[in-house]
Amino acid sequence: MDHYSLEEWLKYVENELGEEEREAYEKHLYTCDQCLEVYLEAMEEVENGLPAMPREDEFINLVMAQIADENTEELKELNEAGGQKRPSTRFERWFPIAFACLLLIGNLVNRLDGSNNKTENFEHD
């Protein structure tokens, strides 16, 4: 089995490869633990080369506050809707109905097919 070098994995991590090459590298990662180690090393190397984020703690706190605000808004919507949040998109509204219809049609077809088989068996006897 051929293995890729650290330099090759660095090109992969830095997105300097064509689409076909990237797919080959990814496929290889699924089967090669040795290259997985080298890939992780390349990831660390690139990550260490990135500039440090200024005021990282403040950024994290800001993101967490926004998440908390969104959760609070969702809870308000839920309480206003009487405990049930209304679907917001057409897909969310119509998918359950369409799925139930498909199940009913499938069951009906299955029953009709079963009764046709019973009549065929009766005619052959």
Image (tube, rainbow, N blue to C red):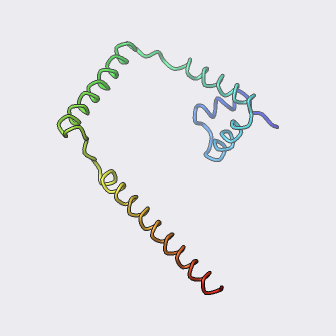
Residues 105 and 22: in front is 105
**Left/right of residue 6 with respect to residue 64 in the rendered view:** right
Number of marks drawn: 0
Q: Quadrant of residue 86?
A: top left
Residue found at the far right of this picture: 1
In this rendering, the answer to whether 63 lies above or below 86 is: above
Along the line of sight, which residue is nearer the eye, 52 or 101? Answer: 101
Looking at the rendered image, the quarter that the N terminus falls into is top right
Residue 45 relative to residue 106: left or right: right
- Please, is residue 59 above or below residue 95 in the view? above
Give the x, y percent position of residue 112.
Answer: 49, 75
Task: Identify which residue, 54 or 73, lies in the foreground.
Answer: 73
The quadrant where residue 16 appears: top right
Where does residue 89 sit, x and y in percent of width and height? 29, 50
Using the image as rendered, state which of residue 123 and residue 86 is in the foreground.
123
Quadrant location of residue 104? bottom left
Tell me the quadrant of the picture where the C terminus can be found.
bottom right
Question: Residue 51, percent across and down?
Answer: 48, 17
- In this rendering, the answer to whether 120 lies above or below 48 is below
Where does the image place residue 56, in percent across and percent down from the top left? Answer: 40, 14
The residue at the point 75 percent across, 28 percent down is 34
Residue extending farthest to the left is: 80
User: What's the residue at 19%, 39% (across, down)?
Assistant: 82
